[in-house]
Image (tube, coloured by chain):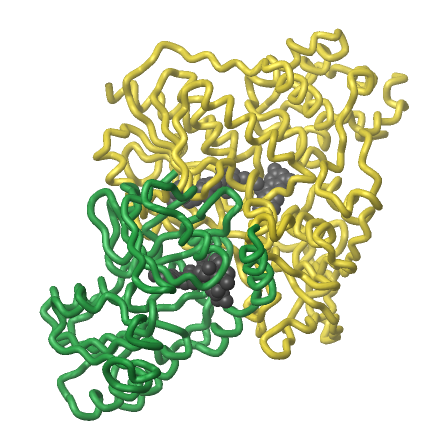
Chain colours: A yellow, B green
């Protein structure tokens, strides 16, 4: 088929030289012609593998056909049935390991740019205000949602649509979870997150900020206050440390602190926003996932001259989205692969250098990736600051303050196949259950749990 | 938005405020703190809960720099943008016979609810309160209502003993064998020397650490402190720790990381934004 040979339609992007001095979005999105041109590449498989590979089974060939036929409204409705955050997912999903990774065109050539098309449709729908904010018949029961990340938002939307009285409690002073405090503006403009939240408000979801469940109100108290079902989507916010000497020196940041200072507290505009940040000229970022790429690219944007990634495996093992790795390289981020930090050196309690051991790859481990092995060779990099981005564990506050809530040793909340925890009427989903994962998986469990909660509330009534 | 329902100027540096914040008040206990943002562009700054009723939370703050000075500009009837809590672990009120509470400057505010709790639990309580001069000795009436004994110190001798709080602490620990516990809250350097004194005389001591914080929920790791060689997050594991295990020097260094930037903010404030 001819379609196989047509190359992908490229999405316009901001010039790498220019964009490292601003926080504007890097990828600029398709115009209508681009979208239609790309849509034509889809060969509309009988058994679409892309749909199977999508964690929420978006009807991909169907919405692509609608784009081809100029039925953008229809395309939006099709996606929205399965995914209420298409503008966000189109931007941040790891498409290469989901839908696009499964696309048959990818076997011999390039897969259809499904992510770019989803983003196009999502943005179109947002501009035209197509999101369906209607609500089924009102039900009197009150439901509480803990956390306003993608898991909480999806859960709240689903339950509100069914007519329940939904209140979302958020610990921070802004809503959105990682979408707001973690993923930077140049990858996911906050305007988009805010619009999605406004949609939920319009549907009648109540939002309460500065409310830490477990502290301000306990789960027990939520029940006393008349919330008949509770969804915990508190995320995985607790940063993991390297556990090496020197980790508490000034100039050592956990990625969460670094990104929160910039994204949530806007320290890139200091002093007009009062929260400061400083990284100096040379910055090392430890880790190879999305968080590491975001931290590295943010460091560049707030003025660091040289930014390097330090990662203990090879390039093929980098867990970040392909697009992020590509963008980071374009922006001049240096990749120091197969290095593992063993000590941070400082003077007068400030970071000066990081000593790393050279690694080599051995046999495959449980994760299916080749295990990094020490070589006994070392190299020291002179740096002004270092950002640790090697993973996060579930937030401990709810666990510490809720009697009878069972968790794994590593902190994840234990749930059954209906997403219910060890406490009756208390459900959970997203990173709080799985550990750090993805936006779409968090959204998916939030939505699934809403189904179980509906069933639970009906049986109870 | 959180309404300021009362405000008193305690001295040139220190104000008292009562804020309407039922979500914070509901579960507040001695030792807990809050985080507030004065306005939408503000920093998140932590302050200890000095007292509370069902709807309101009292804070007492020293106008150290930009954010606390901005807060000081607010008057009764005004609002602050954000006010969240209660944060941290509530103070661990131990089973003790005679407790000495030592506070320096604005440390008198966080110490008050803890010392009250010890009194309520049946301990004898002695207060050692120190400040620069007479005007900076705050909450004297509040303390004098319940403490069994009180010693004041001032740097200039304008009230009570002239000198540092560690002098009477040393004396008391030497002379009074009934004392079996010390709590010290104030500048880090003061807590460090109180700890040395307590350790020297074989007494246990709790201190309240005040590293730089952002979220206060264990998410950012900015507040990490070194306790007995291990890293803890002061916002969820503290802020109170046993003094003899604390790396005070590291804490002081971490507190001063943004000194230049804080100064820049402060200059801007003096120049009228
Ligand atoms: C920097 C960064 C980049 C990422 N990039 C990508 C990407 O490109 N693609 C992708 O798919 N995934 C990415 N991820 C992962 C993704 O963001 C998460 O998997 C997803 O956000 C998890 O959603 P969640 O709703 O479970 O939790 P979160 O998004 O973490 O939201 C949890 C919310 O709950 C609040 N909360 C916590 N405790 C309480 C409490 N006790 N009371 C009230 N509220 C509470 C938190 O403040 C937070 O707002 C990234 C993560 C980070 C940190
Ligand atoms: C748990 C805890 C309880 C506290 N309780 C009280 C209290 O009851 N009364 C009181 O007056 N002060 C208290 N503090 C200290 C108070 O938070 C700081 O004085 C305040 O943040 C200073 O901000 P600034 O902008 O006015 O001054 P700046 O000039 O910005 O800073 C002065 C110093 O305050 C510290 N500081 C700055 N920003 C922060 C921040 N975001 N978090 C923590 N420390 C910071 C730094 O060490 C800095 O050197 C407490 C701190 C903690 C951690
Ligand atoms: S203040 Fe962020 S983890 Fe303690």
Which quadrant is the C terminus of chain A positioned in? top left
Task: Determine the image quadrant of residue A201.
Answer: top left
Task: Determine the image quadrant of residue B142.
Answer: bottom left
Give me the residue at 75% from left, 56% from top: A314
Residue B22, image x, y percentages:
27, 41
The residue most toward the left is: B122
Residue A12, image x, y percentages:
82, 30
**How many circles with numbers are drawn on the protein?**
0
Residue A432 at least partly seen: no
The answer to whether residue A52 is above or below residue A93 is: above
The answer to whether residue A68 is above or below residue B261 is: above
- Of residues B82 and B27, the one drawn nearer to the viewer in this rendering: B82
In this image, B121 relative to A10: left or right?
left
In this image, B129 relative to A171: left or right?
left
Task: Determine the image quadrant of residue A312.
Answer: bottom right
Residue A50, image x, y percentages:
68, 25
The answer to whether residue A132 is above or below residue A358 is: above
Residue A352, image x, y percentages:
68, 73
In this image, A131 relative to B172: left or right?
right
Residue A407 at least partly seen: yes
Give me the residue at 48% from left, 78% from top: B249
Which quadrant is the N terminus of chain A positioned in? top right
Give me the residue at 44% from left, 77% from top: B248
The answer to whether residue B110 is above or below residue A458 is: below
Quadrant location, ligand no. 2 = bottom left
- Of residues A342 and B233, the one drawn nearer to the viewer in this rendering: B233
Give me the residue at 75% from left, 73% from top: A379
- Of residues A332 and B117, the one drawn nearer to the viewer in this rendering: B117
In this image, B122 relative to A121: left or right?
left
């Amino acid at each position: 088929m001819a379609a196989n040979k047509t190359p992908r339609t490229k999405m316009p992007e901001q010039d790498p030289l220019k964009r490292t001095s601003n926080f504007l979005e890097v990828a600029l999105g398709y115009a209508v012609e681009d979208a239609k041109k790309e849509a034509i590449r889809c060969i509309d498989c009988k058994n679409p593998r892309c749909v199977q590979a999508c964690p929420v089974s978006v009807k991909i060939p169907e919405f692509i056909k609608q784009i081809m036929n100029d039925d953008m409204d229809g395309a939006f409705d099709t996606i929205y049935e399965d995914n209420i955050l298409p503008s966000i997912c189109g931007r941040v999903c790891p498409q290469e390991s989901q839908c696009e990774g499964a696309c048959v065109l990818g076997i011999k050539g390039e897969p259809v740019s499904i992510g770019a098309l989803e983003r196009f449709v999502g943005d179109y729908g947002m501009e035209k205000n197509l999101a369906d904010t209607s609500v089924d018949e009102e039900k009197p029961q009150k439901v509480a949602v803990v956390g306003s990340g993608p898991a909480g938002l999806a859960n709240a939307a689903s339950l509100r649509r069914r007519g329940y009285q939904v209140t979302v409690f958020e610990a921070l002073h802004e809503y959105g979870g990682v979408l707001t405090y973690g993923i930077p503006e140049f990858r996911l403009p906050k305007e988009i997150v805010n619009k999605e939240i406004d949609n939920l408000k319009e549907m009648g979801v109540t939002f309460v900020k500065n409310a830490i469940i477990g502290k301000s109100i306990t789960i027990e108290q939520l029940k006393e206050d008349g919330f008949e079902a509770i969804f915990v989507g508190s995320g995985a916010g607790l940063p993991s440390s390297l556990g090496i000497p020197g980790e508490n020196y000034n100039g050592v940041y956990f990625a969460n602190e670094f990104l929160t200072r910039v994204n949530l507290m806007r320290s890139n505009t200091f002093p007009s926003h009062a929260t400061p940040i400083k990284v100096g000229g040379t910055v090392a970022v430890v880790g190879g996932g999305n968080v590491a790429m975001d931290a590295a690219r943010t460091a560049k944007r707030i003025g660091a001259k040289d930014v390097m990634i330090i990662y203990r495996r090879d390039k093929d093992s980098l867990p970040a989205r392909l697009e992020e790795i590509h963008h980071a390289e374009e922006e001049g981020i240096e990749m120091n692969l197969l290095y593992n930090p063993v000590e941070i050196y400082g003077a007068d309690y400030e970071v000066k250098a990081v000593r790393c051991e050279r690694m080599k790859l051995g046999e495959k481990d449980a994760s299916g990736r080749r295990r990094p092995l020490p070589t006994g060779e070392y190299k020291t990099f002179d740096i002004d600051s270092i950002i640790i981005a090697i993973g996060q564990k579930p937030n401990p506050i709810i666990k510490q303050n809720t009697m009878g809530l069972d968790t794994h040793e590593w902190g994840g909340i234990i749930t059954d196949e209906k997403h219910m925890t060890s406490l009756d009427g208390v459900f959970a989903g997203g990173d709080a259950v799985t550990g750090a994962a993805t936006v779409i998986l968090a959204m998916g469990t939030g939505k699934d749990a809403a189904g179980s909660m509906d069933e639970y509330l009906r049986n109870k009534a | 938005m959180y309404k300021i329902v009362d405000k008193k100027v305690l001295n040139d540096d220190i104000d008292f405020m009562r804020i309407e914040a039922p979500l914070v008040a509901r579960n507040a206990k001695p030792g807990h703190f809050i985080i507030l943002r004065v306005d939408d562009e503000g920093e998140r700054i932590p302050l200890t809960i000095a007292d509370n009723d069902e709807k309101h939370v009292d804070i007492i703050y020293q106008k150290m720099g930009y954010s606390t000075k901005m807060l000081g500009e607010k008057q009764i009837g005004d609002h602050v943008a954000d006010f969240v809590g209660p944060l941290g672990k509530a103070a661990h009120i131990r089973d003790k016979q005679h407790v000495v509470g030592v506070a320096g400057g604005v440390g008198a505010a966080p110490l008050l609810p803890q010392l009250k709790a010890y009194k309520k639990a049946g301990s004898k309580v002695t207060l050692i309160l120190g400040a620069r001069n007479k005007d900076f000795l705050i909450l004297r009436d509040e303390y004098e209502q319940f403490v069994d004994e009180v010693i004041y110190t001032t740097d200039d001798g304008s009230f009570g003993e002239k000198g540092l709080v560690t002098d009477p602490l040393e004396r008391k620990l030497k002379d009074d064998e009934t004392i079996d516990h010390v709590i010290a809250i104030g500048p880090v350097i003061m807590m460090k020397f109180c700890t040395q004194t307590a350790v020297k005389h074989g007494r246990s001591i709790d201190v309240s650490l005040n590293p730089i914080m952002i979220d206060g929920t264990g998410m950012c790791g900015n507040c990490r402190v070194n306790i007995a060689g291990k890293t803890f997050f002061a916002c969820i594991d503290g802020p109170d720790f046993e003094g003899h295990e604390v790396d005070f020097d590291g804490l002081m260094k971490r507190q001063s990381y943004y000194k230049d930037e804080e100064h820049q903010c402060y200059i801007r404030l003096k120049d009228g934004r």
